[in-house]
Image: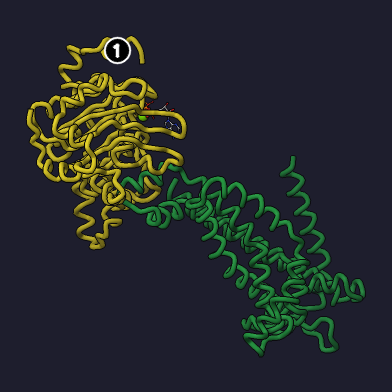
Amino acid sequence: MTDHHPNAPLELTRATSNGPLAEQVQAPEDLDRHDGNVAAPAVERGQASMITVSDLSFYYGAVQALTDVSMRIPPRNVTALIGPSGCGKSTFLRCINRMNDLIEESRVEGSIHIEGQDIYSPQTDVVELRKRVGMVFQKSNPFPKSIFDNVAYGPRVAGIRSRTALEEIVESSLFQAALWDEVKDRLDASALKLSGGQQQRLCIARALATGPEVLLMDEPASALDPASTARIEDLVSELKEHYTIVIVTHNMHQAARVSDQTAFFFEGRLFEMSETAELFTNPKQKKTEDYIGGRFG
Amino acid sequence: MCAAVSVLTTLGIVVVLLSQARGFFQEVSLVEFFTDTRWTPLFEQKHYGILPLVSGTMLVAAGSALVALPVGLCTAIYLSEYAAPRFREVVKPVLEILAGIPSVVYGFVAVVFISPIIREIFPSADVFNAASASLVVGVMILPMVISLSEDVLGSVPQALREASCALGASQFETIVRVVVPAALSGIVASFLLAVSRAIGETMAVTLAAGATPNLTLNPLESIQTMTAYIAQVSMGETEHGSTGYNSIFAVGISLFVITLLMNLLSQWVLSRMREKYE
Ligand SMILES: Nc1ncnc2c1ncn2[C@@H]1O[C@H](COP(=O)(O)OP(=O)(O)OP(=O)(O)O)[C@@H](O)[C@H]1O
Ligand SMILES: [Mg+2]
C-alpha cells in the first residue's frame, strides 16, 4: 500500500527526527498491529488522511482515560465515535482541538497530525488550531449574549470588524445550521431565550462561523426531541460536503444514519473501526457486537 | 425569623432617627439644610448646610473606589483565572485576615505614614487630608472587593470559557469578552457593597481626613465626612437636646438615605442585567 497523503513529504521531513512516526506514515498497516486499533478503511483504500492519531494516551492526573489510540480520519467524511459511557469518547474528541489543555494536571502522550501538522508540537499555535478545528460541546453552551453576538464571536475574535461582513457570516452560518428562518427576526434577543434544540443549533452555527476545516461534535443531539435530532442529522450530512466531521453519539441508529465510518471505544481503547455499514452488520470483535446489540453500555 | 428581626431592627432605627431629627428640623429649615454651603453647628455663627459633609463623604468614597475597584478587580481576575488553585487557597484566608484589621490601625497608618508622603509630593496638602483617608479606606475595602469578585468570577461556568477558547479566543480575550461580562452584575454588586462600606467607614476617616466640614473636590484639603461628624459630636461635650446635638440625627438620616439609595441602585443594576440575560 502506498501513502497518498498530500502532505506526506512534509510529514516525512519532520519525521526524520521522529523515527516511529515516519514508519506509521509510510506503513499504515503497522497501526493494525496495535491490539484492536484499525486504520480508517477509507484511508486504507489510499484516500488521504485529514487527521492522523498515533498512539494517543491521555491522563487526568493519575487516571488514564485513553490508551494507545491510533486512527486516521479522511477529509470531508463523517466519523462516528461510539462506546459505553465513560469510555473516553469526549476525552478523545477534546484532544483533537487541545481543549484538554484547559484541564489542570492532564497529560497527553503520542501525537495527532492534522494535514501533516503535529498539533502537540511546541511550534503549534493553539489559538490558530482551534480556529481550524471547531467544536460543538456535549452540553450546549451559548454565551449570555444576543444570538447575533454569539455567532459573530469567532469572527470578531479573528479580527473582523465590518458590520456588513459580520452580518453576512452570521446569516450564512445560521442558515447552514438550519436556524436562520427561526431567528432572523430576533437576532438581538438573548441566546438563552432559545429552546434547547435551537441553542444546540446556535452552537453549531457559532462553530461554523469561524470557518473551520474540521468539526468535532460531542453528542450534538443528546438532549433533543426527534424532530430537532432529525434536523441535526440532516445538517451533518450536508456539512460533510465541506467539513471533516467527527461526531460522538450514543445512538446506534444515528451513527448508522450519518456516518461513513464508525469507531468503537471501550475502556479508553479504540476497539474496532471500520466502514459504518461493515461495523454494524459484520463486527469483528465480540465486544463490538454485544455493544451494538445493546447487551451492555 | 431572622428576616423579621432585621426588618424590625431597621424600622426601629428609622423611627428613632426620625423622631430625634424632628427636633432638629423644627429649628432648621429643610431649605437651609440642603442648600447652605457651610456646616458650623459648633461655632458661634451656626450654619446647618449638609453639603460639605456630603461632599466630604463622597470624596473619600470616590477616592477609595478609585483605589480599590481597579486593583481589586484585577487581583480577583488574576486569582480566579490565572493563579494555581493551591495559591488561591492560600491567598483567600489571608484576605480574610486583612479584612479583620481594626480600622483605627488604618487611620493611624494614614496619619503617620501616608500623609507625610503626600505632603512631600504636594507641599500644599493639609496634614489631615481626604487623599490619605481615601487611600487607606481603599486598601481597607480591597479584600472585600477581591473576595466577592473572585467568588463571582469563579461561579462563571467553565463551559463558557471552553466555548470561547474553542472558537479561537486567547485566554485574555476569553476573560475580557466572556468571563467578566458574564460576571458583571455580581462584580457591580460587590463594588456597590464595598463603596457602601467606604461611606459607612468612621474611625479611619475621623483620624485621617480631619474635622473641617469643607465643600471641596480637592483631595489634598482637610474635610469631614458624615460619619466622622456623628462620631465627633457623640463623643464631644455638646449638650444633649440642643440643636447641635440633634443635628447628628439629621446627618444620620441622610447617611441612611444615601446607603439605601446605593442598595436600591445595586438591586436595579442586577435586575436590569437579569432581564437582559435570563
Ligand atoms: N475533567 C476530568 N477530570 C478527571 N477525570 C475525568 C474528567 N473528564 C472525564 N474524566 C474521566 O475520564 C473517563 C472518560 O470520560 P469521557 O468524558 O471521555 O467519557 P465519554 O465516553 O465521553 O462518556 P459519556 O458517553 O458519558 O459522555 C471517565 O472515566 C471520566 O470519569
Ligand atoms: Mg462524553
The residue marked by circle 1 belongs to what chain?
A
Quadrant (top left, top right, bottom left, bottom right) of the C terminus of chain A:
top left
Residue in front for this viewpoint, A196 or A135: A135
Q: Which residue is mark 1?
A: A287
Q: Is residue B41 visible?
A: yes
Residue in the image at 68% along x and 66% along y: B199
B268 horizontally vs A149: left or right: right
Instruction: Tell me which colouring the rendered structure shows.
Output: by chain
Query: Left or right: A172 with respect to B234?
Result: left
Indicate the chain coloured green by its letter: B
Compared to residue B148, the image places residue A285 above or below, namely above
Q: Residue at x 83, y 66 (%)?
A: B20
Spot occupied by residue A42 in the image (x, y as percentages of width and height): 12, 27
Determine which quarter of the picture holds residue B136.
bottom right
Task: Locate the N terminus of chain A by quadrant.
Answer: top left
Residue A105 picture quarter:
top left
Residue A35, image x and y in percent? 27, 19
Q: Percent x, y for residue B27?
A: 82, 78
Picture coordinates of residue B237, whole percent (x, y): 91, 76
Name the foreground residue: A151 vs B96: B96
Q: Is residue A175 visible?
A: no
Mark 1 near ligand 1 (CB under 8 Å)? no
- Pick the residue in front: B16 or B266: B266
Specify the chain shown as yellow: A
Taking A114 as reference, is B161 left or right?
right
Residue depicted at x 18% and y 48%? A172
Residue B263, located in which quarter of the rendered image? bottom right
Q: Amino acid at mark 1?
A: Lys
Q: Secondary structure at mark 1?
A: helix
